[in-house]
Amino acid sequence: MTLRVAIIGAGISGLVSIKQCLEAGVEPVCFEASGHFGGQWRYTDPDPQTGKVASSMYRSVVINTCRETMMLSDFPMDPKLYAMYPHNSKVQAYFESYADFFGLRPHIRLNHRVQKVHPVEGGKWTVEVESGGQTTIDTYDAVFVCTGHHATPNMPDWQDADKFEGELMHSHYYRDTNKFQGKDVAVVGVGNSGADISSELSTCTKSTHLITRSGTWVWPRYLLGKPYEYLGSRFMLYMVPRFVALASMKLALGNALGAIPKELKPEHNLLAAHPTIRTDLLERVRTGTITPHRASIKRFTKKGIELTNGEVVEPLDTVVAATGYSLSFPFLPAGIVQPDEDKPGKENWANLYKLIIPPGHPGLYFIGLCQALGALMPVAEMQARWATSVLKNEIPLPSPEKMHGSIAAYQNDLKKLYVKSPRHTLQVEFFPYLDLLARDLGTQVTFGRFLSTFGIWQGTKTARSAYFGPPSAVQYRLFGEGSKPELAKLVVQRLAKKGDDEMSAEEVAEVEKYRAGN
Ligand SMILES: NC(=O)C1=CN([C@@H]2O[C@H](COP(=O)(O)OP(=O)(O)OC[C@H]3O[C@@H](n4cnc5c(N)ncnc54)[C@H](OP(=O)(O)O)[C@@H]3O)[C@@H](O)[C@H]2O)C=CC1
């Protein structure tokens, strides 16, 4: 009997899950609460009545992971259609063409909100769904949770916030600069939201203040003439000692951007915190259009804020809390993802084996619940490949005890590698994490496989491209289960050549070969 999977959410994690289910001969039913697919990447204006917004996307967002790193493994982004760092509307356009190419739309039920998910006997799950005022309940062999972790704003409980006469808003609700022209604004937090929003506001406000308690390393999108991701090649990662790689990156950053202003200068090492990518942030500070402050908010005043370093920032019309997001799975029984969710400081830890499976709850999978150094899309795609293989018993799982051990080891590593913060509880590095899953799937990259698959000349050429070229998920279509070796070889070689070459006619023909059903 065909296995049936309920997929919750039709963002990119949901889309890749539908595709993987179809390829694995599993029947997917994808529920999407909003009237559109694309998840966070689909820009929406606020609801005129409620002011609610479906995604955190502001109008100007340009993705901060390059085309080569964000594209899915068997659907190359054509440089003729997509800039190296595409605008959010183009990212959404890519998702739509992916959905059309692989025939995913018929499997998505829009305006269907999952209310409850419950385990039942035999390892199955019931899913209660509301749509148009009607509630239906159905049973599935498995559930893929694809709702991500950037939907529930983390709004700190600041002292005297209620006394502030201006507006306090979370970056989740920020759309564009319109209502901020000529105003005095403070942005709190210097993650990618804070960096983007403060930089663009500073072009039109009377004053823009940027408040940060930890500072940050700032990356430009291009470094040494190439997208910064090229520094994350297999060669740099696996063949250059980490301290040498970090020192060269710092040197390259220093040469490109100069010294970081003292208010933003972090105490942590490069890559010990999620990177902030914004080419003009430091320039906005150096030209005086952003005033940085190294402090936390002590309390709000009627007219502004008092900081922990004694500064008082007044007057302010608006404070934008670009303070990130919290995990939330209101449709799941408590304790599945976060057994210690009531304990302070445990908020964002997810007890998931390989960041996918909650031990002791067979049939439940989380796709895209991670924070990738690199792009999330291919990571979610690999998780979906791995999860469907587990579902079909092609990958054996360890006992729940062993899974708990593996989760503890991963979380201990995170504590050693990253600054202790709710921001760094789901962190993965692109190649190491994808290689981990690829080893289970049998799709890992090894030098011997290049030679045995493509022969000495093409094998060596492709291996060189894979090791020195940009990080790209297309490498996981070179060998093993689900491989598309001719397509993958052409793409890997093209990306390593220049990065902005057009797709060759051969490449286009190879893609067409894989159109769903052909
Ligand atoms: N162009 C793009 O592609 C964009 C991508 N994104 C992505 O979206 C995700 C979310 O990013 P973002 O919204 O920036 O959230 P992040 O969690 O990455 O950053 C939150 C920031 O808020 C600070 N902060 C949190 N709590 C407090 C507090 N109580 N007081 C003061 N400061 C606080 C953090 O500081 P500290 O470090 O000290 O904890 C940090 O600087 C990330 O994956 C990001 O990469 C976001 C925007 C644009």
Image: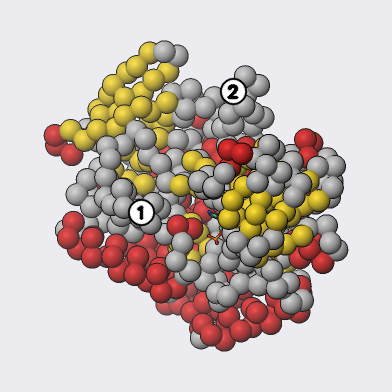
**Horizontal and vertical percent position of residue 1:** 22, 33
The yes-or-no answer for disc 1 within 8 Å of ligand 1 is no
Nearer to us in this view, 378 or 404: 404
Instruction: Assess disc 1: are there few (<14), some (14-19) or many (≥20) residues with their C-alpha within 10 Å of its C-alpha.
Output: few
Q: Mark 2: which amino acid?
A: Thr
Circle nearer the N terminus (1, 2): 2
Residue at the (14%, 37%) spot, across then down: 122
Q: Secondary structure at mark 1?
A: loop
- Between tags 1 and 2, which lies in front? 1
Residue 401 is marked as none
Q: How far apart, in angstroms, are the residues tagged by discs 1 and 2?
A: 31 Å
Regarding residue 303, the answer to whether it shows in the image is yes
Instruction: Assess disc 2: are there few (<14), some (14-19) or many (≥20) residues with their C-alpha within 10 Å of its C-alpha.
Output: few
> In terms of image quadrants, where is residue 53?
top right
Residue 344 is marked as 1
Q: Mark 1: which amino acid?
A: Pro
Whether residue 41 is situated above or below residue 31 in the rendered picture:
below
Query: Label 2: which residue?
Result: 50
Whether residue 103 is situated above or below residue 316 in the rendered picture:
above
Rendered-image quarter of ligand 1: bottom right
Number of marks: 2
Residue at the (48%, 66%) spot, across then down: 429
Regarding residue 71, the answer to whether it shows in the image is no
